[in-house]
Image (spheres, grey):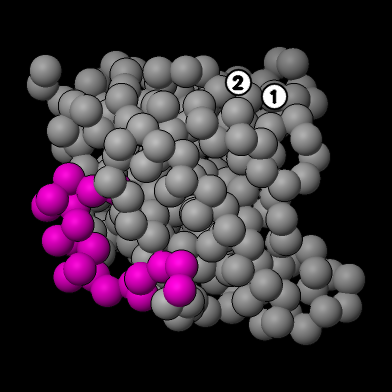
Amino acid sequence: MSTKYNRVLVKLSGEALMGDMGYGIDPVIVNNIADDIHEIVKLGVKVTIVVGGGNIFRGLAGSAKGMDRATADYMGMLATVMNSLALQDSLEKKDVATRVQSAITIHEVSEPFIRRKAMRHLEKGRVVIFAAGTGNPYFTTDTAAALRAAETGAEVILMAKNKIDGVYDSDPKINPNAKKFDKISYKDVINKELKVMDTSALSLCRDNNIPIVVFDFTRRGCMKKIVLGENIGTIVEG
């Protein structure tokens, strides 16, 4: 079966993993995400993943409550490692060979991020989950996703949203008349402050010509449809 994209990076927010629980990791949600990733792996697509940590701890929120920003961000990075291990466990139960590479060194549970080693894993058909963001405070996991996508030659970033099926001109959860875009430029996303990704991440994608497809991950099978070329969600490019 011919695919439009042969190498993709999937960006998951930490909040995506908690489902309706309000906190933590929902095993059912993680299993569903792993199923969808498994489907595109079976098509021969090379897959990398960046997952956030907001379901456990969000650095910016900690900073807003008086915590040192760098300390709060490092705590957020550790939360992403926990999420990455949960996703790895679910994928490997489906016989999908998976490696976690962390930008902060935790030898007992993950490999350090080494680009050449990540590329080798991809060549062998393994899924690589990049944990701990960029390894630096003050940078979001969105920026980490854009950076890792550029480093590993991803052809597209699949931006998984929770019950939001694309980019709108206003919040569709608040405004029932919000207009959805089928396609929008990086510049318009930045100028309209549409919050698809942070500005640094968007600029990095624009400079490296990496399109972003925003879709609702709760609609099962969307990842497979996207890599096969179906118009799902909103594409940010150009």
Decide if residue 59 is in sight here.
Answer: yes
Determine the residue located farthest toward the right in the rendered image: 65
Closer to the camera: disc 1 or disc 2? Answer: 1
- Per the image, label 2 sits on a secondary structure element best described as loop
Which residue position is annotated with label 2? 179
Place of residue 142 in the rendered image (x, y in percent of width and height, measured from the top left): 50, 56
Instruction: Give the answer, above or below, for where 80 lies relative to 137.
Output: above
Viewport quadrant of the N terminus: top left
Specify few, some or many for label 2: CA neighbours under 10 Å numbering under 14, 14-19, or 20 or more: few
Q: Amino acid at mark 1?
A: Pro
In the picture, residue 118 is in which quadrant?
bottom left
Q: Residue at x 18, y 52 (%)?
A: 122
Q: Amino acid at mark 2?
A: Lys
Instruction: Give the answer, above or below, for where 34 lies relative to 198.
Output: above
Marks 1/2: CA distance? 8 Å
Ranked by sequence position, the earlier of labels 1 and 2 is 1
Q: Residue at x 23, y 21 (%)?
A: 228
- Per the image, label 1 sits on a secondary structure element best described as loop
Which residue position is annotated with label 1? 172
Q: Nearer the viewer, residue 176 or 70?
A: 70
Q: Nearer the viewer, residue 215 or 79?
A: 79
Q: Which residues are magenta?
A: 108-127
